[in-house]
Amino acid sequence: MDLQIDDFYKDCAAGLLALYQAFPRKVALYVEDLIGREEPDEFGLPSKRHQSCLGALLWLADEGYLRYESTIAYDALDQAVLTEKGFLRLSRAVPHAVRDGEPLPASVRRVQASLAHQLREALSSRHSERVARLARLLFEPSQSGPAER
């Protein structure tokens, strides 16, 4: 089993959700805020888990989901913000996320059906398979057409 991939999905979701909560402001995105405190190794280098989380955030930037101005050592991305691609992916609706018969206002249905809301719920319930399934939706191109970068 590839547990690092489950951590990757979790790290990507947590990092993007932190930026979604701050959007459109630029913020410092600290690894420790996403995964908790990890003790450095005997040489003072960040743990493998810490490095993996930072690697996931850098990968998201390379793939166009977020932008940042610089890194703060191995600790954070400074002045990070979602790109249009990241924002649109998180705000799009997840099919069948909200039952059709529920009498909810349209604005509540829109928010609850969003990928961001569904990811937040999956992370808070620690449902790793649901996090992985939803995170994979982040990486699928939108159905709107070829305009997406």
Image (cartoon, rainbow, N blue to C red):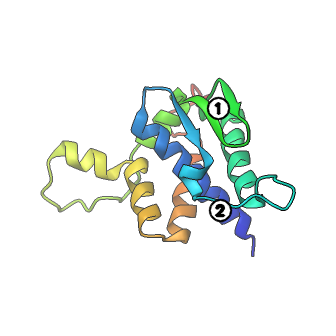
The image shows residue 76 at horizontal and vertical percentages of 64, 39
The image shows residue 89 at horizontal and vertical percentages of 49, 40
- Decide if residue 104 is on the left or right side of residue 134: left
Q: Nearer the viewer, residue 86 or 4?
A: 4
In which quadrant of the rendered image does the C terminus lie? top right
The image shows residue 50 at horizontal and vertical percentages of 70, 55
Disc 1 or 2, which lies upstream in sequence?
A: 2
Q: Secondary structure beneath disc 1?
A: loop
49 to 70, vertically: above or below:
below
Q: Secondary structure beneath disc 2?
A: helix
- Name which residue lies at 60% across and 35% down: 65
What is the crowding at mark 2: few (fewer than 14 residues within 10 Å), some, or many (at least 20)? some
- Name which residue lies at 38% across and 47% down: 93
- The answer to whether the residue labelled 1 contacts the one labelled 2, judged by CB atoms less than 8 Å apart, is no
Q: In whole angstroms, how far apart are the C-alphas of marks 1 and 2?
A: 20 Å
Give the residue at the far bottom of this rendering. 1
Which residue was labeled with disc 1? 64
User: At label 1, which amino acid type do we have?
Assistant: Gly
The image shows residue 39 at horizontal and vertical percentages of 70, 61
81 to 113, vertically: above or below:
above
Which residue was labeled with disc 2? 7
